[in-house]
Amino acid sequence: MKIRTSVIVLVCFFSSIAFLKYSEVDNNLTREDILYINKILRGDLESPSLETFEQEIEFITQIQDRIISYSKTEGISKFEKREPKNFFRQQKGLCYDRSRVIEKILRYYNFKTRHVSLYYYGKKNKYLALLTPRIDSHTVTEVLTKRGWLVVDSNIRWISLDQESQPFPIDKVVNQKGKRKTISWMDSGVKYQHTYGRPFIWIYGLYSRHGKFYPPYNFIPDINIKEFLYNFLNE
């Protein structure tokens, strides 16, 4: 009986792992991605020089500006792909669509990226907020530069660079008041305050809670497992 129970537990465990892997968001670059990345960039940024941190920042902000400028403020529908091809052809996208394309472009140029979802909880418990339907949320990108991880916003032309040109990851951006010295950002205007001045919880590698943005479009949240593991690592 104990052996049978152990077998059942193991089968359930490995079946769950297999199902999660089957449902995982695929971050591989395809030939189609590369074709449409070049269409989006129109050859303007074909061979950038990225030998210095300053050159990295210039290139990253150019990509950010191109993606924000290119798209209308309307999201790609659920149950549809949101890859560079779809973004290029539909010429629309909200933060979760834009960040996907920004990340694929940056990975095409050999940057390491992390997908970051932000959930604003206000006066709610921040962990319960994750289970709250239609809660206010946002999606951004972290990119690894020569000086460390940098947040690249997908709606506003803002990156997490301070006055000393030091980049900061998302955990240094959030909850500045009362917990650590306020960072003097390179740009912290009204749009920054609306996006990052409110309390939020962030999760790496979560592309949607509903599972309807990426194939196979099931009820399992859209997650990239490798990126999701960053939630448990101190890097």
Image (tube, rainbow, N blue to C red):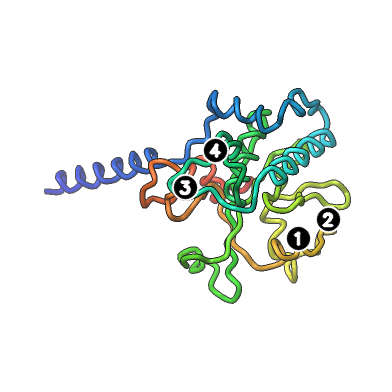
Residue 17 at what x, y percent from top left? Answer: 35, 42
Task: Give left or right: position of 140 versus 221.
Answer: right
Q: Nearer the viewer, residue 144 or 131?
A: 131
Local packing at callout 4 (Cα closer than 10 Å; few below 14, some 14-19, many 20+) is: some
Task: Tell me which label, 1 or 4, sits earlier in the chain.
Answer: 4
Local packing at callout 2 (Cα closer than 10 Å; few below 14, some 14-19, many 20+) is: some
Q: Nearer the viewer, residue 172 or 98?
A: 98
Residue name at image x 78 percent, y 26 percent? 48
Frontmost of labels 3 and 1 is 3
Q: Which mark is residue 187?
A: 2
Residue 13 at what x, y percent from top left? Answer: 30, 45
Q: Dot 1: what SS?
A: helix
Q: Dot 3: what SS?
A: loop
Q: What amino acid does circle 4 point to? A: Asn
Q: Dot 4: what SS?
A: helix
Q: Which mark is residue 84?
A: none
Marks 3 and 4, how far apart at CA: 12 Å
Q: What amino acid does circle 1 point to? A: Tyr
Marks 1 and 4, how far apart at CA: 28 Å
Q: Which mark is residue 192?
A: 1
Task: Tell me which label, 3 or 1, sits earlier in the chain.
Answer: 1
Task: Give left or right: position of 221 versus 144.
Answer: left
- Check whether the beta carbons of the residues at disc 2 and disc 1 lie within 8 A of each other: yes
Q: Which residue is mark 3?
A: 213
Residue 118 at what x, y percent from top left? Answer: 60, 58
Q: Which residue is mark 4?
A: 86
